[in-house]
Image (spheres, rainbow, N blue to C red):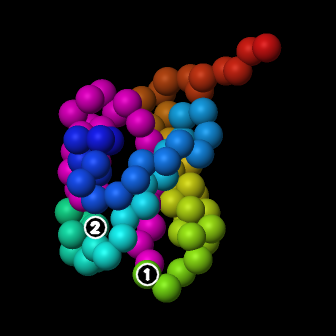
Amino acid sequence: MRHIFEDFGPICRISGDEFVVLLYDISEQDFNELMKKTNAAILNNDRIASVGYAYGGSSKASELIKHAEKEMYTAKNRFYSETGMARREITN
C-alpha cells in the first residue's frame, strides 16, 4: 500500500486487517488509475487482499467508507467462489 499511496494521502488502519486511504485533491481519473495499480498489485501477489473503494468529493466520509466496505466484501465473496477456498475460521 505504501508503494502506491504514500505520495497521495495517509494510510489509516481502522481494524485488524482493514485500512482506509484518504486521498485529497485528486481527480477521478487519477483516482481510477491508482485503483488499477492497486488491483494489479493484488492480482500479481496471489490475491493477497480484497479491496473496495469509493470516490466522492461531496459525500460524507462515513458513506464512502460504507460503500468501499460493501465492495470489499463483494470482492472477498468472489475470491472464495472463484478459488473454492474455505473462509478463514476464527477460533478462540
Instruction: Tell me which numbered mark, 1 or 2, is placed earlier along the sequence.
Output: 2
Q: Residue at x 57, y 70 (%)?
A: 61
Residue 75 placement, left or right of 14 = left
Which of the pair 53/13 is nearer the observer?
13
Between 79 and 60, the one lying in front of the other is 60
- Neighbour tally class for label 2: few under 14, some 14-19, many 20 plus, Cα within 10 Å: some
User: Which mark is on residue 57?
Assistant: 1
Q: Is residue 78 visible?
A: no
For this view, does 50 lie left or right of residue 92?
Answer: left
Query: Does the CB distance between marks 1 and 2 fall below 8 Å?
Result: no
Asked if the magenta segment contains residue 46, the reply would be: yes
Residue at 49% of width from left, 24% of height from top? 85
Tell me which residue sits at (62%, 40%) in the image: 15
Quadrant where the image shows the N terminus: top left
At horizontal 20% and vertical 63% (from top left) the residue drawn is 33
In the foreground, 4 or 36: 4
Say what amino acid the circle numbered 2 marks: Phe
Q: Where, by quadrant of the figure, is residue 90 drawn?
A: top right
Question: What SS does tag 1 mark?
Answer: loop
Q: Secondary structure at mark 2?
A: helix
Q: Residue furthest right?
A: 92
Instruction: Locate residue 80, reporting x and y percent.
Output: 50, 34
**Is 73 colored magenta in this rendering?**
no
Residue 51 relative to residue 60: left or right: left
State the quadrant of the C terminus: top right
Residue range of the region highlighted in magenta in the rendering? 34-56
Q: How many marks?
A: 2
In three-dimensional space, the C-alpha distance between marks 1 and 2, rounded to whole angstroms, equals: 12 Å
Q: How many neighbours does mark 1 have within 10 angstroms: few (below 14), some (14-19), or many (20 or more)?
A: some
Depicted 45 relative to depicted 68: above or below: above
Residue designated by label 2: 31
Residue 84 image offset from top left, x and y in percent: 48, 27
